[in-house]
Amino acid sequence: MLGQQLHPLIGRDAERAVLDRLVADVTAGRGGSLLIEGEPGIGKSALLALALSGARAAGCEVLTGQCDELGQRLPLSVMTRLLEVETGSADPRRAEAALALEQPEQAPGWTMRLLAGDPVVAATEQLLVLVDRLCATGPLVLAVEDLQWADEASLLMWRRLCRAAVQLPLLVIGTCRPVPGRADLEPLRRDLRSQGGQSISLGQLPEAHVAELAGLLARGVPGPMLTERLRSAAGNPLYVRELLDALERVGALHSVGGRVELTAAGQDVGELNALGDVIADRLAGLTADARDVLRTASLLGPEFSVTDLAAAVGRGAGSLLAVVEEALGAGVLESVGSRLRFRHGLLKEVLYEAMPEPLRAAFLRRAAQDLMAAGAPVERVAELILPVLGTAEDWEWEWLADNAVRLGVRAPIAAAELLEHALRHARPDDPRLPVLTAQLAALYFRMGPLDRAEELARSVLRHTSDYELIGRVRWLLSTIGMRTGRYEYVVENWRAATADPRLGPVWRARLLALVALARHLLGQIGRARLAMAEALAEGRRLGDPTAVGYALHAASVIRSWHGDQAGALALNGEALAEIGNEPELVDLRLILLGKRVTELDGVDRLQEAEEALAQARTLAERVGATRLSMTLVQSAERYHEHGHWDDALAVLDEVTDLPPLWRLARHGLLALISARRGHWQEAAGHLDAPAGRKAPSAGPVATAYLLLARSLLAERAGRLGEAVEVLAELLTDTYAHDVGNHPEWLPALVRLALAADDRQTASAAALAARQEVDRQPRPRTRAAADWCSGLLDQDPALLLAAVDYHRAADRPPDLGNALEDLASVQAASGDLDAARASFGEALAVCADLGAVWDARRAAARLHPWGLRPGSRGPNVRPSSGWEALTVTERRVADLVAQGLSNPDIATRLLLSRRTVETHVSHILTKLQVRSRREVGAAAEAGSPMP
């Protein structure tokens, strides 16, 4: 049959050249991306097939996938199929990825689970890790057809793959139609352009090329009548092929002397004026049984197994072998490994659209029930239920109540749509209504909006007497209060809960543990301690890890507040051991790890702090974008404190999704680093950003960085009074706890106040520093107190003690400032030799940091005593070449040269995979190379660090 041939690529020479170049590049280790756009049948698949054939011949691993309209609500379904992620895979990398994607089984019956994070985002990260590992073993080509039907999560992952392709031996190819138009395809096109990707838009073939194509397919030159008939194909290659095949099936073609023409009978064949007509004509040649089975197959997604098809039609797999063979022989289906798919999306669409709406709905419902009975994945069942929600029957809601938690993990958008529809149509007395409402509330708690989650949770309390469900909903409301900084609301919810006789003792203990945390954050330390002690005792009596874990966290926070870091760390470790790896407590585990990092860093146990932060990053990558971004901001804080400012900037570049208060911290850190480096316009831009203009509220550490940066801008402008006023806010109760964690903020206020002749404020800051020593006597608080007192009393010995601490604690930003203050006091006391040495060391620290403003300020302060900077100014790295790389980038480059994947480099250096990806991107740009192989050559020449 003519239609069994792939039509030759006539008139596509320029497009073939683009593909040949991309395949050659990826084979050489240089990645790329390509989007092929055009109408159905215009040649996208044929062009793609040619490229993939060439890639396979060149030794690339080639993986292909296809989207369809029914899969748009199922996140990452096309990507997991594309990457062949299966638990039983013989490839350990794929099996490991499948294991990471697995979610805990839902308990039987109706229930509600409050899981932390976004499993779709976490799954995306795991799939990207898999791609990194696949690329480490050789060039990889990923191709997905019909991106116009891709789900949103798959499109976002596709964009990230396009960005990653510039640093991996990875070629990413997608095809899409112009209709339906999708707004979220435009960002993909922009990413392609910004990353140097390619796009091809296929148009109609001119008449000469249509004739050439027809001649090859029909094995002869088309005669005048056939040429006229082919004009109806409008230059569409698939239409040309299908039209010729249709004419051949009815004996309407004959060949004489190398010319192919319509027969006399063929001239009387009715016009097939649309591509759908010729597709329908092809399908009409199948047996009635085959057409019936294929109609059901058109409901099953882009790819399906014979087992899936057998379940959907309610027959044994053996009875379908003849039908499958017939469809394969007719060119309607094709094999994709062990699965099947329609040879062209149009074949599937014609079968699907040809069914009358009532018949299609009946087919979908029957197929869904058959898949349920066969134990198919919940997302496959939901895929069939969603198109017929308007005619849903009672069994759908029974299935949804039993499977909402699992569906919410695997396909949250589909779950939300199904649950919202169920709530709108459920009877007020339906016993399933409260649990369906609670499941939707839990889903919105994870994916937003939180106000809708709160509204639904409150409605559950009015319609249920189930004590377990009431407890979970009360917990959800308190957790929303904690997340949004409404700590009084947490206490109010606790009072209302304890007045409700339906609340069980386990939930009372859990809620009381949250009350302890809320009261602490409200400054009610005594009441917080009492609530914590009661919750801890009750939690232990009941053997409940959740209540015990949160109560121990509250105890640790309170102990830290009173200056007992050793006790706080011990309680923190006890809490981590208590909660283990329970999925519903992942959020608490991340909170505990974050607090552990702060405590360890505060007592200068820096390696342990870095290891705890690495654990948090690894866990956050599995939870989702928000938690990961929060952990990355905490990483940036540590990098900032320890002088790794370029690394801090690289990490902050990765941040994508933050709660408002964490956005303040990000803008504050960026503004502070920019100001100290003398990049005033950038600093002002971060301070003027919407997230940088918000007034302090909960989480003052976030706004403290903004205060520090604003004071620098005022100081630079000569407005010392304003600089003091801005920074004096650190002395208010709002910042008391955070100043305890960052006592080094106070000496800057003392220095500024003395420069502004405001000795009262300077004395107040020095007193606050001494009080921190009384509250938590540790080297870091003592050093800050010595620094403040040394400035206030002009005592070089105290300042020297502060310098010695910061030098030993590896805190270069504070060391440089302390040396500057020491040099100034030494010069004022007449010890110019000592001042000159301190000044020189301060400038050297500033040079290493690139702290241009710090160096200029130090020079201005020492100028009255005749001290001048030496020849060394701030280090200015070249913009390109090996010397342009930061220390971390050199380490990463060395590991790239050794052939390690980004995830493996991340593990080696205790970084996140995304941080490594950012570093590699910078390395390629600075070294002006296009592949990891070329990085290896540059590393050899540049003498990389061991």
Image (cartoon, grey):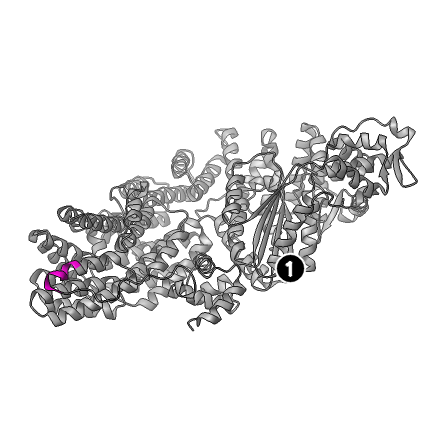
Residue name at image x 42 percent, y 34 percent = 463
Judging by the rendered image, the residue that carries numbered circle 1 is 60
Q: Is residue 862 magenta?
A: yes
Residue name at image x 51 percent, y 58 percent = 167
Q: Is residue 567 visible?
A: no
Residue type of the residue flagged with mark 1: Cys
- Main SS, magenta region, reads helix
Q: Nearer the viewer, residue 394 or 17?
A: 17
Q: Nearer the viewer, residue 14 or 273?
A: 14
How many marks on residues?
Answer: 1
Q: Position of residue 110 (x, y in %)?
A: 51, 43
Is 755 on the left or on the right of 611, as rendered?
left
Q: Position of residue 61 (x, y in %)?
A: 64, 59
Residue 545 lies in quadrant? bottom left
Is 661 on the left or on the right of 97, as rendered?
left
| Residue 569, placed above or below residue 188 | below
Q: What span is colored magenta in the figure?
A: 860-866
Q: Position of residue 10 (x, y in %)?
A: 74, 43
Is 856 on the left or on the right of 448, as rendered?
left
Crowd class of label 1 (few under 14; some 14 to 19; many from 20; radius 10 Å): many
Q: Position of residue 93 (x, y in %)?
A: 57, 62
Q: Secondary structure at mark 1?
A: loop
Residue 4 lies in quadrant? top right
Q: Is residue 581 magenta?
A: no
* Quadrant of the image containing the N terminus: top right
| Residue 103, placed above or below residue 223 | below
Is 791 on the left or on the right of 652, as rendered?
left
* Quadrant of the image containing the C terminus: bottom left
Q: Is residue 830 visible?
A: yes
